[in-house]
Amino acid sequence: MRMLRIAIVGALAWATTATAAPKGWLDQPRWPTPKAGDRIELTWLVYPIPPPADTPENTRAPLALEITIGGVTRVQKFPPQLGALKPLNLPLCEGAVNLVAYPFERGEVAKITFYEGGAGGFLVKRAASDVLSVIGWEQSDGACEVKGQIAMCPRHDKLVTKLHVPKGLEIRERIFEVDAKGTRHPFDCKS
């Protein structure tokens, strides 16, 4: 009888851990079954900069990313970001500006860049056909020594979270600036 109890407790413990969401994954709430016309909406929300504590250089813009499929939304919040949000630095604005300083790299599907004498922000990269990775990145301005040669400074990436997504859905990126009343305004790529 004692062995049976141990076996049952062990099986329950295994079942509980096997169904729990893996650490580092943003997999709740559950996505609906995709329908024709569904896509993955990646929406960056840049909130108003709160009054500075001491100087304008120390003000930081709150930031979040909404990931929406079929009316279900997951939200990833980030630390407030330092730097200017300009069309020149955003792949989303390619075509509206002649040159994008920080274009998409291989596998990237969305990217927001804040420039402050160096650049950084967050990006979304396709890690597999059914997995997206959200990554924080930063890059120093200017030239660095790389393997004994002068080159553009390397980018430093850090995984924030991952999420499973249905395969084969188109991805659409948007940026909204949110005013103090909570109203969303589409980012103007021509400003």
Image (tube, helix red, strand yellow):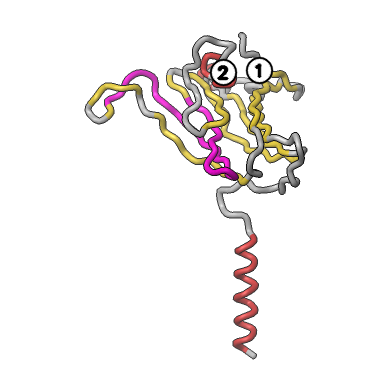
Based on the picture, tell me whether residue 51 belongs to the magenta stretch: no
Q: Give the percent coordinates (x, y) of residue 170.
A: 65, 33
Foreground pick, 22 / 127: 127
To which residue does mark 2 refer? 85
Q: Main secondary structure of the magenta part?
A: strand
Q: Would residue 145 be found to the left or right of residue 125 on screen?
A: left
Q: Amino acid at mark 1?
A: Phe
Left/right placement of residue 128 relative to residue 186 reads left
In the image, is residue 152 above or below residue 4? above
| Mark 2 surroundings within 10 Å by alpha-carbon count, few (fewer than 14), some (14 through 19), many (20 or more) | some
Q: For residue 73, what is the image quadrant?
A: top right
Tell me, yes or no, whether the two marked residues, 2 and 1, touch with CB atoms within 8 Å: yes
Q: Amino acid at mark 2?
A: Leu
Residue 128 at x, y = what percent?
54, 44
Query: Where does label 1 land, which residue?
Result: 187
Q: Residue at x 47, y 38 (%)?
A: 158
Q: Which residues are magenta?
A: 120-145
Seen in the picture, residue 32 relative to 136 is either above or below; the reply is below
- Give the left or right position of residue 70, taking residue 77 as reference: right
Q: Is residue 132 magenta?
A: yes
